[in-house]
Image: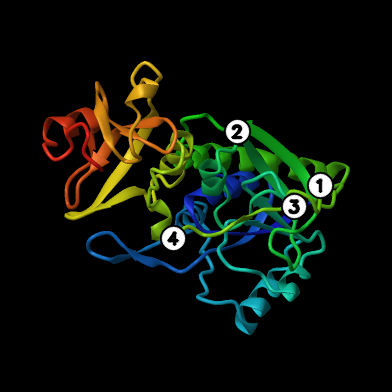
């Protein structure tokens, strides 16, 4: 039996394991579509997306259209792919593209649908304090992540896990899910289940302001926000000398913060061994790594040694 002809569409590092899974499964990858090169670094030199680099390593010239048009449609139709696989491509596919391959278009999405449809499912799950997430492989349709699901894999979210660490784990898990689906497709075919209409939530794309910390929330919510917006946009507090970035936190223990010591939110309570203890609406957090404006990231302990403006009783 001839190898399955597959077109891959994806852009960031999250999508690279999915592309590699196609090659490992013995698929005939007839094309790789990704976003155009973008300026990056201090020199703002054009840099290829991770998927474009991966395609080149396999001897394929990536297709990098700035927008989808009649030209791109004709080019993809000419490839005669039997299946499209889409992983974090970055653009919505019009219906005529979805209709091209006879096996349809499969999408690997980093959440347990219908929870967290949309652009930032990993970060939103962490910010919300979810304890469990996973990946779904679904058949794409015109709606935003509304298609029927043929495969799910689940994983726990660690209580201190950042979105960047979870991103890397789900990237690998997504590739595993795709491999499972490809094996079923060529043997017994796929069975799809419509998504439930209950429990739908949307993961809006993160904006810079989403990293602003509100210490009137409880300590768990503050901690979840900081780990959820890591590495971008990063947690921060507005101060007179600029934004103080909070790179990581931990929950203060009951021994570190007796109930009688709790004060107005955002108050410096005391120094811990690994950083300043800050009161929240309920409970307290320890700032374990920070970054002053224009400075390098330092540990909370190092920050304390030079932080004369953050003595106990002062507001952050």
Between disc 2 and disc 1, whose residue precedes?
Answer: 2
Residue that badge 4 annotates: 207
Task: Relative to 126, say whether 30 is above or below.
Answer: below
- Dot label at residue 185: 1
User: How far is the residue under mark 2 from the one under mark 1?
Assistant: 31 Å
> What is the x, y in percent for residue 126?
53, 41
For the residue pair 167 and 158, the one nearer the viewer reads as 158
Question: Which element type, helix, strand or loop, lies under badge 1?
Answer: helix
Question: Which element type, helix, strand or loop, lies under badge 4?
Answer: loop
Residue placed farthest to the front in the image? 260
Between disc 2 and disc 4, whose residue precedes?
Answer: 2
Question: Which element type, helix, strand or loop, lies under badge 2?
Answer: loop
Q: Residues within 10 Å of mark 3 (few under 14, many from 20)?
A: many
User: How far is the residue under mark 2 from the one under mark 4?
Assistant: 23 Å
Query: Toward which corner of the image does residue 217 lie, by quadrant?
Result: top left
The residue lying at 38 percent from left, 29 percent from top is: 250
Between disc 1 and disc 4, whose residue precedes?
Answer: 1
The colour scheme used here is rainbow
User: How far is the residue under mark 3 from the one under mark 4?
Assistant: 27 Å
């Amino acid at each position: 039996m001839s190898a399955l002809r597959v077109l891959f569409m994806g852009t960031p590092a999250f999508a690279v394991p999915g592309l590699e899974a196609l090659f490992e499964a013995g698929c005939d990858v007839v094309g790789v579509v990704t976003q155009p090169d973008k300026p990056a670094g201090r020199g703002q030199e054009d840099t290829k997306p991770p998927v474009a680099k991966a395609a080149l390593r396999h001897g394929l010239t990536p297709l990098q259209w700035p927008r989808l048009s009649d030209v791109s449609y004709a080019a993809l139709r000419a490839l005669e792919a039997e299946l499209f696989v889409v992983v974090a491509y970055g653009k919505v596919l019009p219906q005529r593209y979805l209709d091209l391959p006879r096996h349809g278009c499969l999408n690997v999405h980093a959440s347990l649908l219908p929870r967290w449809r949309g652009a930032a499912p990993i970060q939103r799950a962490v910010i919300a304090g979810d304890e469990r997430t996973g990946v779904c492989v679904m058949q794409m349709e015109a709606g935003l992540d509304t298609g029927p699901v043929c495969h799910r894999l689940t994983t726990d979210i660690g209580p201190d896990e950042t979105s960047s660490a979870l991103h890397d784990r789900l990237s690998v898990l997504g590739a595993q899910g795709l491999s499972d689906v490809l094996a079923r497709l060529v043997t017994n075919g796929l069975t799809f289940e419509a998504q439930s209409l209950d429990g739908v939530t949307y993961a809006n794309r993160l904006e810079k302001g989403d990293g602003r910390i509100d210490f009137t929330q409880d300590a768990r919510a503050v901690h979840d926000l900081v780990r959820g917006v890591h590495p971008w946009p990063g947690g921060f507090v507005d101060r007179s000398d600029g934004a103080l970035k909070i790179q990581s936190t931990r929950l203060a223990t009951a021994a570190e913060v007796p109930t009688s010591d709790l004060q107005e939110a955002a108050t410096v309570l005391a120094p811990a061994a690994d950083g300043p203890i800050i009161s929240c609406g309920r409970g307290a957090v320890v700032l374990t790594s920070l970054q002053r404006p224009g400075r390098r990231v330092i540990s909370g302990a190092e920050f304390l040694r030079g932080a004369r403006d953050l003595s106990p009783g002062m507001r952050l």
